[in-house]
Image (cartoon, grey):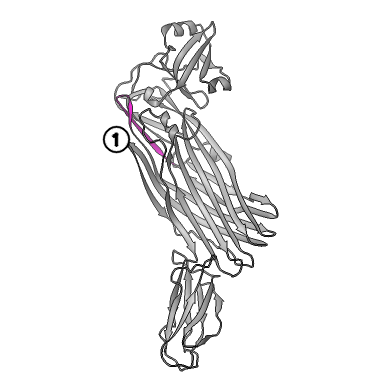
Amino acid sequence: MRKLISSLFVLSVTATMSVFTACNKLSKSTTAPDISPIIVKNNVVVIDTTQYTLISTASQLTQGTYVFLGKSATLADIRHNGDLATGNIIVGYTGEGYLRKITAASNDAQTITLTTDQARLEDIFQQGLITFNTGTPDNSIFQYPFSNTELYNAAGTKVQLTGGSLLLNTLQTFTLQFADGKLSSLSANGVNGSLAANMQLIVNAANASSFNSSNTLQTFTTTSTIWAGKIPLVITTEIDLVANLSGTASGAVNDTLTINNNEAYSLNTAYNAGAWANTNNFLPATILSGNVTPGASGIAATCDIIPQVNIKFYGVTGSSLAFPYKSSITGNKSATTADWDFSAGLYLQPTINEVAGILGYSLPDYNTSWSTESAIYVSPYQLIKLSGDHQTGAAGNYLPQPVEVRVIDNRGIKQPGVLVTFAVTSGGGSMSYYTATSDANGIVVGYWQLGTGTGAQTLSASAKKADGTSIAGSPVVFTAN
């Protein structure tokens, strides 16, 4: 697992457009070819790490103070030439990188001290098209196993995630277009992304209880430097895998909720002509399923697994572009009946927040987000009539054929273990039994004895969720004469 993550999000870059304007003391010009025609503003200085070492303390960096120790006699010459003068932009690729505007500068025999403010990519690029990926199809896969992961343990209630894993393909392509010194457009495009999760949520309560927790299961971070011409772009990708849990148990309970889903998606978030736009395309698979075992005590539990993918430029705190995915499971079971219900879903909420200002001063409406919901799984979902309607029989006798219903989920798949209740609604007849649980094929069969009266007689079959509301199609009505 760690071997996989260590290579996660290896960044690549291509850049196209016209002439590169030379900057003093640009470093590592041979690291990547000078791809034209990117035009860089003439007050940009890339710190040459062969000449200078950043020695600022963490406290100084927080305050915007950058202190460099010179490694050669060129220190005085560089200071004299004005490359580190007030108003210039410094770009560094040490650690998570930095992009700063110099507001004041001083030096002694060995060090240069710069007072700085946060700069933007618009301070660097006059013109150019920059495209880079947050991974490739071979190394953008994030995988996490659920192996007896404890989410809650207090007051006699224990909730665990066990026997499953989450697999997330987070390949994203970013395109930044600069024109006339401004960021004219950007897009973050995810194609052929996927989220697959198989989970077991075990709830074990000794007595009535409620539970609520939020756990960061794992955090993975990688920082890479890519080159747009001779400018290093330092990009950090962080994945926080968060599990949010909530629920109640009305008494002693030991139940397992399960989910298996496999969702494909494409995502495009774009800024163009002064406005944000967002397009999602989800391709839900057909293997999403789940169940909760009926029992004596009531239970309601929801577990959301959220891989939060954040992209940072030059170490700016917080996400500049965020792509949270949520795989959710919810199980409910009645405390007084055997009625239960289960649901699961995949959600996506891409967000552009105010830290996106690292890209440019001119971006409007930073606090923008979109919420999309798809691939919702619900069981039991619908009660359908199979056979036994419109029969004719002798008064006081059983009909020649039984009445038959089936319980299905919202994909049309048969659902076992669902309680179905029969009720004679007119004619005074009776049933061989009034409640039954659907079999392995989702079927419940009932035998209807007609009343002694004449004329049409009716019978209903119904199924409910844990909260007492009817599922789709319920009640199903049968008529006999």
What residue do we see at 49% from left, 14% from top?
Answer: 114
Q: Is residue 438 visible?
A: no
Q: Which residues are magenta?
A: 171-184
Q: Position of residue 347 (x, y in %)?
A: 46, 50
The part of the image, by quadrant, that contains residue 30 is: top left
**Mark count:** 1
What residue do we see at 39% from left, 26% from top?
Answer: 121
Query: Which quadrant holds the N terminus?
Result: top right
Residue designated by label 1? 273
Q: Position of residue 343 (x, y in %)?
A: 50, 59
Nearest to the observer: residue 251 or residue 221: 251
Q: Is 41 above or below relative to 149? A: above
Horizontal arrangement in the rendering, residue 268 relative to residue 437 (left or right): left
Horizontal arrangement in the rendering, residue 249 relative to residue 449 (left or right): right
Identify the amino acid type marked 1.
Answer: Ala
Query: Which quadrant holds the C terminus?
Result: bottom left
Nearest to the observer: residue 301 or residue 43: 301
- Tell me if mark 1 has few (under 14), some (14-19) or many (20+) residues whose alpha carbon lies within 10 angstroms of its own: few
Q: Is 209 above or below relative to 426? A: above
Q: Is 100 above or below relative to 447? A: above
Q: Is residue 273 visible?
A: yes
Q: Position of residue 308 (x, y in %)?
A: 50, 42
